[in-house]
Image (cartoon, grey):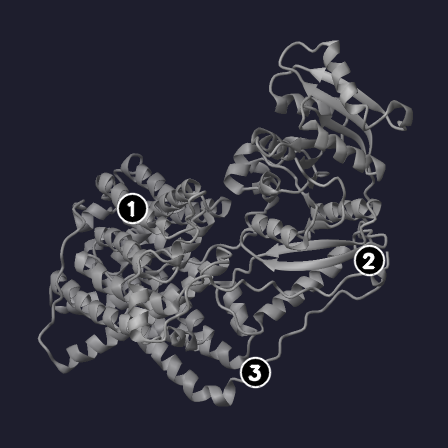
């Protein structure tokens, strides 16, 4: 087929978000203060009277999943900072409640983050026991600098300075994230190695101010103390967490991995000398709320410098991380309502830093990984954050005794997993492809942070950026992708030429709801899309001839015997459930399509269509009640796979039969890059166009125009239904391979979601096997290629 003959329209630019429904940002300090102290605002706009029960349930589920994931991560972060494990639990829970109350984002989850580890660890080491002080004095000084930082952040929000956080270039953000990841991995390696005399090294695992060299030196000096069984547990925790999260975001992988390894350590490996949390920190109390006042050491020039140093570090991490996380959350949630408010976010971050440390906690900020988990788990409103905080405290209260039994090697394994996910290859490539100046800036920051300390590395990079950018930061034109050249399709590529559906099973209810279905079937038969028809009625008792005659009488007005040029059969069966009966009927009739209706007042039929699309061997065409018995606009979602090529070929065939001149091929994607340069969107669109041209070369369009449409959204089903509504489509044609019920629960199904919610007919094309089990999905490599969530 000649690709040049295709009528491919120029792709449209992504549809802009509708304007915010929230009130405009006040221009005065008084107006901002009033807005910031409004607790019930437009962030709760999705909590509607008609759907508040479903929304609350989704928020509760998301909160529970995040709470289970966050407990081991919070403990690990806290211990890496040189603090006690319970302090991480209270800090994460309280920060989320305060942040969700006063912050500027609908979705952001607050808690301990890896970016704070070198800052707090350095402070605790310098002012704690390792520096000649006490733990209480170190934590009190941390409270002091955190309160000052919180006041600074609140002032920045009141004066409208939130927008200036965006001045920090992406290259420095990526660089300090990578540098922190290296420092975390290096400083926690002794935990994974299970060094027996761990108590001798308390504080040394927080050796960030001494640089990477001192950490490596400590590690080498203690190699003789390695416990191989601890190494096994640490690596097992790391691997289980990574694998389980790739299978499904709904699995609380860190909690399950630590639980499994803790059980092994307490039973099979109980005599192997494995160091556990209790050996170092003693009993974990469940009275989490303990007031901690600020402490000011004897004033000196060094103390004054340290106050400035740590306040600046907390402000920098809080500002950059929170705004980065808020922006990512709006994209991931496909937020089309109130966008995050950077100034209100600074105000909320300030209150987090003021309140949380004074209640036995420490500074926290927006957590990318936990926010992504919350959104993917279904969070809609700030209620998810409240649920996460309360559930986290409740769960930790009841399992405190078991948390003491967690091996330190497992904590190290969790932190290694966090460090590995902090280095995002896609973001590094984004910076490298921008220009040499930013690439060098990223490498400089990534090296300086672990070799010196956090703030020295970041500040020196910022100075370098603002001094040299006017000379070295040259604008770069967006790279043009290599497009597939016009001409014939790739040699040897399969050309998809679908035909009509020859054997169609049509279930009848023998009620008024059959009228719309029969009208739609008659239209499809008239345009030649379907041929032989096999009508079936699932009886609740023994089938009788009267039932068959009733079916024939109902069908006769639409398919008169005198005009029939196709085979039409009628059969009544009593074979258990409707689902099982229809599956057996389609197999017996060698059906290649099931055409069924749906009454708007009933949910069972829609559920039936959804389940059939998952488990049957044939395609499923669902025509809801009230659907037009014509086809004028066709939308076909694609993912550039062979299955979607088959589906769009079928969409083209239907359009050609219905004399529809154009089919919209919709590709929904979500770019995992959290950070972007200005030319990023243009580059992504160019890559999409290139892949589409190669993809469409395998499809025989036979003169029907194919218009590609590219939409970024993390919720594919929502994007498909929204696009269908915007275009006024009256048919959605998509591919489905089907999945078992268990696989669908864990992995989801876009086809099922579209069928369940679509107000227009949906054709789910299935020509590639009956269904995919969890085993099939794992062996297919789909989840191995899936991008991992950003950790912080």
- Dot in front, 1 or 2: 1
Secondary-structure class at tag 1: helix
Q: How many marks?
A: 3
* Residue 565 falls in image quadrant: top right
Where residue 475 is drawn, which disc sits there? 3
Q: Quadrant of the C terminus?
A: bottom left
Q: Earlier in the sequence, mark 1 or mark 2?
A: 1
- Dot in front, 2 or 3: 3
Between the residue at mark 2 and the residue at mark 3, the CA separation in whole angstroms equals: 37 Å
Crowd band around label 2 with a 10 angstrom C-alpha radius: few (<14), some (14–19), many (20+) = many
Crowd band around label 3 with a 10 angstrom C-alpha radius: few (<14), some (14–19), many (20+) = few
Secondary-structure class at tag 2: loop
Q: Give 83 or 318, whichever is nearer the viewer.
A: 318
* Residue 615 falls in image quadrant: top right
* Residue 570 falls in image quadrant: top right
- Residue 378 lies, in percent from the top left, at 45, 47
Where residue 392 is drawn, which disc sits there? 1
Where residue 445 is drawn, which disc sits there? none
Q: Can residue 166 be seen in the rendering of this structure?
A: yes
Q: From this view, report whether residue 164 is shown above or below residue 583.
A: below
Left or right placement of residue 257 versus residue 675 in this view = left
Q: Give 310 or 559, whichever is nearer the viewer.
A: 559
Secondary-structure class at tag 3: loop
Mark 2 highlights which residue? 489
Name, please, the residue furthest toward the bottom: 471
Q: Earlier in the sequence, mark 2 or mark 3?
A: 3
- Residue 383 lies, in percent from the top left, at 35, 49
* Residue shown at 78% from the left, 19% from the top: 553
């Amino acid at each position: 087929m000649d690709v040049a003959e295709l009528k491919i329209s120029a792709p449209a630019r992504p549809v802009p978000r509708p304007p915010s429904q929230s009130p405009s940002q006040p221009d005065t300090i008084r107006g901002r203060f009033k807005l910031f102290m409004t607790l019930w605002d437009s962030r709760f706009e999705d909590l509607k009277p008609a759907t508040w029960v479903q929304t609350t349930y989704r928020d509760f589920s998301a909160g529970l999943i995040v709470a289970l994931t966050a407990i081991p991560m919070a403990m690990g972060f806290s211990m890496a900072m040189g603090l006690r494990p319970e302090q991480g639990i209270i800090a994460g829970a309280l920060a989320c409640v305060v942040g969700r109350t006063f912050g500027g984002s609908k979705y952001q989850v607050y808690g301990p983050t890896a970016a704070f580890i070198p800052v707090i660890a350095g402070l605790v080491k310098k002012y704690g026991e390792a520096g000649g002080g006490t733990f209480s004095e170190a934590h009190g000084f941390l409270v002091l600098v955190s309160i000052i930082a919180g006041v600074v952040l609140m002032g920045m929000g009141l004066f409208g300075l939130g927008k200036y956080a965006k001045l920090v270039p992406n290259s420095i953000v990526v660089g300090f994230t990578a540098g922190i990841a290296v420092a975390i991995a290096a400083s926690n390696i002794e935990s994974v190695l299970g060094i027996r005399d761990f108590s001798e090294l308390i504080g040394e695992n927080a050796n960030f101010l001494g640089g990477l060299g001192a950490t490596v030196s400590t590690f080498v000096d203690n190699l003789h103390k390695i416990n191989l069984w601890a190494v096994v547990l640490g690596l097992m925790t790391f691997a289980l967490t990574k694998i389980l999260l790739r299978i499904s975001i709904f699995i609380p992988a860190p909690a399950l991995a630590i639980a499994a390894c803790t059980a092994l350590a307490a039973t099979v490996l109980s005599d192997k000398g494995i160091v556990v949390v209790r050996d170092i920190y003693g009993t974990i109390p469940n009275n989490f709320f303990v007031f901690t006042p600020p402490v000011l050491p004897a004033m000196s020039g060094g103390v004054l410098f340290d106050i400035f140093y740590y306040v600046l570090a907390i402000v920098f991490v809080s500002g950059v991380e929170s705004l980065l996380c808020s922006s990512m959350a709006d994209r991931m949630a496909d937020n089309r309502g109130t966008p995050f408010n950077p100034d209100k976010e600074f105000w909320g971050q300030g209150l987090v830093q003021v309140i949380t440390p004074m209640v036995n906690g420490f500074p926290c900020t927006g957590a990318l990984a936990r926010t992504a988990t919350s959104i993917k788990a279904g969070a809609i409103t700030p209620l998810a954050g409240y649920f996460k905080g309360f559930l986290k405290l409740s769960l930790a209260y009841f399992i405190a005794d078991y948390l003491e039994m967690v091996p330190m090697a497992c904590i190290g394994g969790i932190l290694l997993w966090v460090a590995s996910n902090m280095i995002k290859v896609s973001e590094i490539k984004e910076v490298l492809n921008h220009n040499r100046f930013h690439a060098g800036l990223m490498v400089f920051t990534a090296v300086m942070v672990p070799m010196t300390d956090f703030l020295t590395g970041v500040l020196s990079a910022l100075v370098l950026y603002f001094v040299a950018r006017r000379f070295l930061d040259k604008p770069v034109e967006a790279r043009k992708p290599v497009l597939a050249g016009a001409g014939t399709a790739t040699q040897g590529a399969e050309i998809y030429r679908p035909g009509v559906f020859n054997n169609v099973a049509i279930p009848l209810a023998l009620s008024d709801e059959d009228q719309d279905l029969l009208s739609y079937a008659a239209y499809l038969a008239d345009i030649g899309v379907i041929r032989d028809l096999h009508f079936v009625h699932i009886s609740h008792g023994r089938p009788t001839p009267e039932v068959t005659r009733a079916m024939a009488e109902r069908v006769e007005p639409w398919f008169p015997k005198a005009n029939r040029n196709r085979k039409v059969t009628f059969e009544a069966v009593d074979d258990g459930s409707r689902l099982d009966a229809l599956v057996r009927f389609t197999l017996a009739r060698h059906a290649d399509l099931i055409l069924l209706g749906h009454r708007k007042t009933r949910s069972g039929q829609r559920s039936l269509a959804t389940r059939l699309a998952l488990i049957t061997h044939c395609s499923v065409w669902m025509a809801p009640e009230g659907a037009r018995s014509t086809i004028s606009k066709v939308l076909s979602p694609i993912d550039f796979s062979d299955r979607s090529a088959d589906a769009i070929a079928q969409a083209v065939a239907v359009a050609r039969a219905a004399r529809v001149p154009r089919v919209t091929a919709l590709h929904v994607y979500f770019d995992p890059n959290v950070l972007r340069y200005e030319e990023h969107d243009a580059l992504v669109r160019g890559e999409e166009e290139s892949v589409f041209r190669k993809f469409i070369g395998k499809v025989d369009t036979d003169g029907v125009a194919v218009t590609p449409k590219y939409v970024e959204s993390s919720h594919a089903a929502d994007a498909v239904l929204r696009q269908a509504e915007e275009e006024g489509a009256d048919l959605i044609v998509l591919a489905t391979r089907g999945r078992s019920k268990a696989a669908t629960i864990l992995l989801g199904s876009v086809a099922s979601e579209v069928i369940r919610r679509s107000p227009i007919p949906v054709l789910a094309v299935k020509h590639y096997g009956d269904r995919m089990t969890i085993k099939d999905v794992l062996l297919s490599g789909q989840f191995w290629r899936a991008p991992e969530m950003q950790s912080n």
